[in-house]
Image (cartoon, helix red, strand yellow):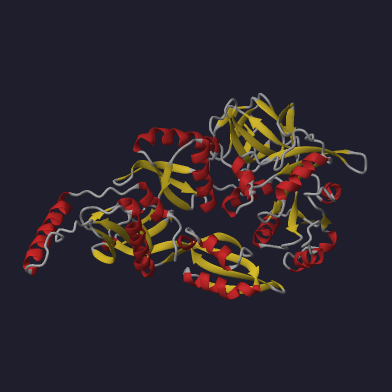
Amino acid sequence: MKKIRNFSIVAHIDHGKSTLADRLLQEAGLVDERAFHDQMLDSMDLERERGITIKSSAVSLAYKGTDGREYRLNLIDTPGHVDFSYEVSRALAACEGVLLLVDAAQGVEAQTMANLYAAMEHDLVIIPVINKIDLPAADIEMAKEQIESDLGLDAQGAVLCSAKQGLGIDKVFEAVIERIPPPSGDPEAPLRALIFDAFYDPFRGTVVAVRVFDGNLSAGNQIFLMSNGAVHKVEEVGLFRLSREPAKNLSAGMVGYVIAGIKTVSDVAIGDTVTLVDRKATEALAGFKSVKPVVFSSIYPVASDDYESLSEALEKYKLNDAALIYQKDSSAALGLGFRCGFLGLLHLDIVQERLEREFDQSIIMTSPSVRYRFKLKNGQQIEIDNPQDYPDPAFIEESLEPYIKASILAPDRYIGAIMKLGLDRRGVNSNMTYPTPGRVEITFEIPLAEIVYDFYDKLKTVTQGYGSFDYELIDYRPNRLVKVDILLNGEKVDALSVIVHKDRARARALNMCDRLRDELPRQQFKIAIQGAIGGEIIARSTISAFRKDVTAKCYGGDITRKRKLLEKQKKGKKRMKMVGKIEVPQSAFIAVLKTEDD
């Protein structure tokens, strides 16, 4: 155990986490030049394109230290986004230390702070690493100053490196060996292993990534999952190299994988404790919780004939992503579909992209919404995430919506723009601190519904790309919530209904009516597009009818002749309106559901 080190790399988005992992793999001789490609641990095309880690992974490195001893360094990579914060916390629970990466040009940012606090919660040894020292804009002294003042860490011990150029990688390895303590645990005690990740292999079923804290685990053992009481027989255990490498056993302190004939990833809970059936541990490892979705949206196929293939695609997708929750849904306008729950907006975006790319699905997603709570007059409390389930307003005693604490870090010249954006989105209790000269951290308490649409895009726009954003859910608070319906010639289009704050209802309804007016094709009759709260119309747009110039043949003569022809046409249009059906094209739904222009 003294030769094992378990560590993770945490950083703000785009500070070079995946590049540093690549260099560590090369330095440890795990991959040769011919097989190497950038972002080795990121297996999805989407991850490589966007430069983010979506699915965490682990790899075991053999490294010979300067003292001549062989060490086994287990790098547990983590996803790099706030949506996956629970997965990050479980990966950190499997480590003894972290490398906290700071970009030498950009310094400490919002997620750097969030990751630091997460690492401190688990009492991990934190080694600051200043990356990208080869950049012309690199300011190492500024980065050190921010590490001391913002993070409260000793910057003198910061390791300097350039992951891209491969400078200082040996120093990173030495820092891991010297500063991160070896794991502690009792190999003779009953087995306790933490599940920090799981993924699906089409030939072997679910492969479970574990960190063993106590005891031993080997093939043939009967294991017991403490959260759901499931029992499985272990077929194979081993280590994560770039491919899976079977081993005789996994003992205390080790990180590896377990294959035990588990059918889907949903059968395994991240953060669960694994023990043996014949020698059970008395208590589970701390920190387990079930992950709940935060953002909800419905998915419909563009062509209704594709419903079956979309259903199959979601089933296959769910094998690999236990966080996605879905159930059948239907809409009068869009037909059959699925109501889905996501961990956040990035998660929603990834699911949509992967369904379109990997499963070749053409889909429409309804406007994302959050889960609201309603206290009814009969004392009952209900939670809804779909506007179609909105209760009768006459029975509502109080409506509550989820609030988040948003932390925004940016240069102080953008204070005015950030404050305006926060207040426009109903932000309250704003607080401002200056971590270092020239940089400001502003915190707001904002309703989650206000950031679901385009808050991040707007923040990037007003701060010219320098603003970084991090958030956490805090609680539910009472607010005046109403359901806005869209009517076409008096008929409700259920897929376009939304729940909004009463003060925002008119602006939102007008926006949707105007977008529909631009997208719906003109007919031979007039189309009224209305936004309504219950029976009250709060916004309206009208699409004019096509008209033939019926008075063209009247040269001169009495005005009554022209009026007679126009009246006749008007009656015909009215008759047509009674029988005319409005087909809403898919492009109109997509236009309305896209991010809104304020």
Decide if residue 343 is on the left or right side of residue 218: left
Q: The C terminus lies in which quarter of the figure?
A: bottom left
Decide if residue 22 is on the left or right side of residue 458: right
Q: Position of residue 32 (x, y in %)?
A: 79, 34
Residue 563 or residue 85, whichever sits in front: 563
Q: Quadrant of residue 483?
A: bottom left
Residue at the (41%, 63%) spot, across then down: 400
Residue positioned most to the front: 555
Q: Position of residue 538 (x, y in %)?
A: 29, 67
Q: How many marks?
A: 0
Residue at the (64%, 24%) spot, across then down: 235
Q: Position of residue 252 (x, y in %)?
A: 74, 37
Decide if residue 77 is on the left or right side of residue 459: right
Residue at the (56%, 65%) spot, across then down: 461
Q: Quadrant of residue 156?
A: bottom right
Residue 156 or residue 107, whichever sits in front: 107
Residue 479 in view of the camera = yes
Q: Position of residue 471 (x, y in %)?
A: 57, 60
Q: Quadrant of residue 48?
A: top right
Q: The N terminus lies in which quarter of the figure?
A: top right
Residue 216 or residue 161, whichever sits in front: 161
Residue 481 in view of the camera = no
Residue 29 or residue 73, whichever sits in front: 29
Say if 164 sits above or below 252 in the image. below
